Amino acid sequence: MTRPDENVTARLDALMAAVARRGPVDTDGVKAELASMADEYGADPRLRTLFDTMHSAMSATDAASMRDSLGRLGALAGNAPGVAPMMDLMPDYLAAIEAHENGDDLAAAARFSEVLARSGDLPAGNPLREAMAEVAPALNAMLTGTALPEPPPGASDAERAFHLMANGGRDADPGAGVADLRRALELTPPGHPQRPFCLASLALTLYRRSEASGSLADVDEAIGLLTDARREAGGPEHQHWSFINEMLAGLHRRRGDSAPARLAALEGLRGYTWRILLQPDPASARAVAAEAAQEAMAAASRCLIDHQPADALRALDAGRGLMLFATTELRDPCTRLIDAGHRDLADRWRATTDPSPRLREQVLEVLARGTGLLDPPDLDEIQRALGRLGADALVYLVPADAPAPGWAVIAPAGGPARYVPLPHLVLSEGVHLTAAATRDVGEDDDEPLDDSLGALCEWAWKAAMGPLSASCPAGDRVPRLVLIPMGDLARVPWQAARDPGGTYVVQRVALSQAASARMLCDSAAAEPVPVTPSGLVLADPDTGGRAPDLRSARLEAYAIHRRFYPGATYVGRRPDGRVSLSGAGTADDVRRWLRADSSEAGTMLHLASHGVMTTDRATASSHLLLAGGDLTASELVGVMASVQREVALVVLAACHTGRSIHGYDEAYSLGTMFLAGGARSVLSTQWSIPDQDTSLLMYMFHHFLTTEGRPPWDALRQAQMWMLDDDRRPPEGMPSPLRRMLADTEPARVVAWAGFVHWGQ
């Protein structure tokens, strides 16, 4: 039997060749072979991890993802023969690919030539040198736009098909390209892994030819080819599923067949959901998610042009919050796997904290079988959720993309979906949502938030909330809307939209937000949990000099604890600065409370501390600064998975706890991680909140929640209106330190009350 190290080297060579070609290679075949080797040598944990990382590299869709996967591969491979020379060359090689992806083909060609020359210095017979020599003609042709050289005598049908597909797709004469691709298709039999791509390549070239000639016959043939390609691909798990369906949608639109075009576009979006679920790390998922959001908005706009708002809702949700959905869906799939008769998969999933790509595929194949795992909810599901929540409508806000207007796409609690064109829904550059005196020690500058909010509030009314308010149902009760703002619109405090008379939307309409319609339906389906007089209150933990003290947060938390939750555990610092005997306010304090299995622990969590976030691609993070360490959004996935009881309410009285760290359309934040973990309601923040004003708002929120028995969304609205009321009066029982704050603050400032957003029930 071949020694494992030799197999490692052989597979690394195959990986290098596959990555280098960057074309229509049999990646599925290579991945299957890697999975087979993992099964054969799986008794060695190091080799199994190595093969799984190779599998991840094969699945990478861009140079950045490949760089991450292959970097981990090199660290795992260690001293395996032949690995070190390849790893020495990979940084420059991936830089060449990145340059090509960025459109700088001259730089890419120069980098590639350098890598090729360096590989030529390796000894004759070195597998890396041979691999580079093999792929050099193909890569040179790709980077320079020239034709591939003829394959050598004795080349396999697959190699000749690759040559014909590459040249046929590049040929300036679509007619010649069609001929090459027809021959390539003849060399690629049904069932071959590359046949779907070959069919799609021929369809694309026919489409190009039809644009030049005006021939609808080419369009019809291309539609037939893509229909075959979709059947051969099998489903959204195929790497080319989205590409095939997006092109098919375009061809149907060319034919004027709007209904099949919409169906194909929606099918293509399912492929992004599958790809997100398979990604092993946030960096890889983020690139796919950004692409999915753009495709979803484009598909939704085309649905609205066809006057099909229900399809537009499905399209938008198919590209929204996918990283959050994947985190939730794969948090603990074991029960469903066992129910489906796959206890072995459940045991393997439980046994690892870092599931391999192959294990993910196997689990997802089971979970998706006969279920709607990849499908966003339809209008009926959304309406049932709205009914359970007592909300009047779910509203997607889609920014304008000139010359097309923006849209409000509305799923009402009853009746058909509808939409409202919003031509002014373009968030102008230069809106800075930052503040100076805050609970934040994050990345923002010191420009006061008040300076930028006035014009933003007026714009928000004109751009969206004015038309939406006018369309709300009239009646005795205040209408309630659940918003899903797309893209940069998530930065806007919609509750602070102000009409020309100076009235804010919050005074007319109750607003909540949702990460997606999927998440809204999940929240609505959960049984309500009452807020109990016990829970956990955390106040201004000592961060060891990493952040300034929050004296008002201490007063706020202590007053809330004493007045509304006398049975709660109080951790952190007391108003006089002393550390509570119950705990210093550490991440472990929060973890222990969440994992407590006793009902005496309570159902309410109030966290008054510093919040930090960074959005850099490599180090994106959102976390609370606590005593002795931090609590991060990513960590909450595992913590919430281990929670044995229900949590009614989480209040995050810290900065930026509602801002997404992976792009606005992902809604992946501290707040939504609690929500995805099962918390029924969450309050989180959009910006750097001011310390004193926040203390007043939070006290009033808990007053309306407990003393008046209002649901969380209404308690927040009532507290915000109290802040706006010039005749506001402190309620009975408000401690004197908080009463004195009224003389030192301006509660009606937008920055003082509008930063908090309600999510969930």
Image: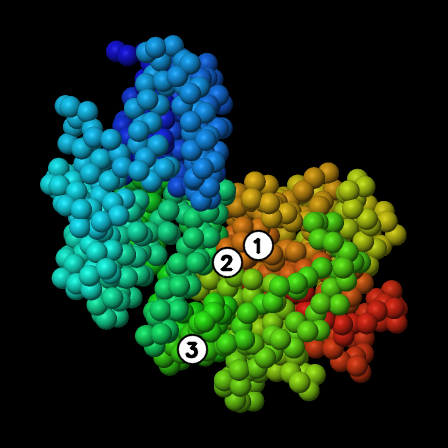
Does 743 appear above or below 477? above
Secondary structure type for disc 1? loop
| Viewer-nearest residue: 658 or 639 | 658
Q: On the rendered structure, is 698 left or right of 758?
A: right
Specify the amino acid type for callout 2.
Asp
Does 149 appear above or below 280? above
Locate residue 300: give its quadrant: bottom left
User: What is the spatial separation of the Cα atoms under label 2 and label 3, in whole angstroms?
Assistant: 20 Å
Specify the amino acid type for callout 3.
Tyr
| Viewer-nearest residue: 578 or 80 | 80
Q: What residue sits right under mark 3 in the picture?
A: 419
Locate residue 700: give its quadrant: bottom right
User: What is the spatial separation of the Cα atoms under label 1 and label 2, in whole angstroms?
Assistant: 8 Å
User: What is the spatial separation of the Cα atoms under label 1 and label 3, in whole angstroms?
Assistant: 26 Å
Specify the amino acid type for callout 1.
Ser
Bin the neighbour count of mark 2 within 10 Å (Cα to Cα): few under 14, some 14-19, many 20 and up. many
Q: Earlier in the sequence, mark 2 or mark 3?
A: 3
Bin the neighbour count of mark 1 within 10 Å (Cα to Cα): few under 14, some 14-19, many 20 and up. many
Is disc 1 in contact with disc 2, using a CB cutoff of under 8 Å?
Answer: yes
Residue at coordinates 20% horizontally, 64% vertically from top-left?
214
Residue at coordinates 74% horizontally, 64% vertically from top-left?
449
Q: What residue sits right under mark 2 in the picture?
A: 665
Q: On the rendered structure, is 690 left or right of 658?
A: right
Q: Position of residue 179 (x, y in %)?
A: 14, 45
Residue at coordinates 72% horizontally, 71% vertically from top-left?
750
Q: Earlier in the sequence, mark 1 or mark 3?
A: 3
Q: Position of residue 445 (x, y in %)?
A: 74, 54
Residue at coordinates 70% horizontally, 49% vertically from top-left?
442
Locate residue 33: give its quadrant: top left
Quarter placement of the N terminus: top left
Residue 99: which disc?
A: none
Q: What residue sits right under mark 1 in the picture?
A: 660
